[in-house]
Image (cartoon, rainbow, N blue to C red):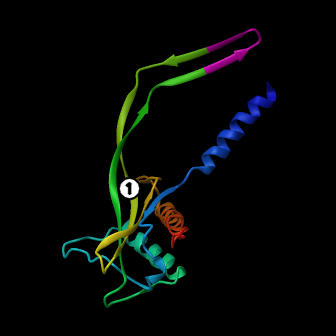
Amino acid sequence: MRLLKIMIPCALLLLSGCSAKVATDYNAGVDFSQYQTYQFAEKAESSIVSLDKDRLEETIKRELRFKGLQPSDQQADLTVNPYIREMTDFDSYGTSVGFGVGYRYSSIAYSTPVRFREYTYGKLIVELIDNKTNKVVWRSVSRRQLTENMTPAARESFIQEQVGEMFAQYPPSRG
């Protein structure tokens, strides 16, 4: 019994570490070695670049440089379209569940009411568009949340980690 109490939390910890932090999709028929240059998608005249969007673009520039792609002012091979999609979700609070185990007895307790609060978060998305065909050939989405209550340092670290995960398997292997 004692061994089981130790093994269950360890197994849950291991399984949570195995979950993917990003979801990536790509066109399997594309030869990604043909791409040598990139440019960022043009911003609208009235578009305001947020601090997080600027952090995102700077991190993407670094990752693409590591992958051997060069920025281009002329017609590039790829257009990079990064954005932060604002999402909302609900968080429940007020409910508690308790378990008790003793000699010759066990119990479970549950209390209500359930309360919900809505919160907003950002989802990082990066698309690579082939400029010859004007089609998305690669897309990656963060599964983690960029939340409003993060400090600037935490936001920077989060974006760097997520973009690193996104480009870890770029270019995709053919097979």
Q: Nearer the viewer, residue 64 or 145?
A: 64
User: Which residue does the image show at 40% across and 21% down from the upper left?
Assistant: 113
Residue 90, given in percent of the width and then of the height, sits at: 37, 38
**Helix, strand or loop status at disc 1:** strand
Q: Nearer the viewer, residue 73 or 75?
A: 75
List the single residue furthest toward the top: 104
Direction from residue 33 to residue 113 in the image, left or right: left
Q: Which residues are magenta?
A: 99-107
User: Which residue does the image show at 57% across and 50% down from the upper left?
Assistant: 19
**Displayed quadrant of residue 37:** bottom left
Callout 1 amino acid? Gly
Residue 47, given in percent of the width and then of the height, sits at: 23, 71
Direction from residue 18 to residue 110 in the image, left or right: left
**Displayed quadrant of residue 83:** bottom left
The residue to which callout 1 is attached is 122
Instruction: Decide if residue 51 is in sight here.
Output: no
Residue 121, given in percent of the width and then of the height, sits at: 38, 51
* Residue 100 located within the stretch drawn in magenta: yes
Q: In which quadrant is the C terminus drawn? A: bottom right
* Residue 128 located within the stretch drawn in magenta: no
Helix, strand or loop: magenta stretch:
strand
List the single residue furthest toward the left: 46
User: Which residue does the image show at 47% across and 73% down from the upper left?
Assistant: 59
Direction from residue 143 to residue 75 in the image, left or right: left
Circle 1 packing at 10 Å, graded few (<14), some (14-19), many (20+), is some
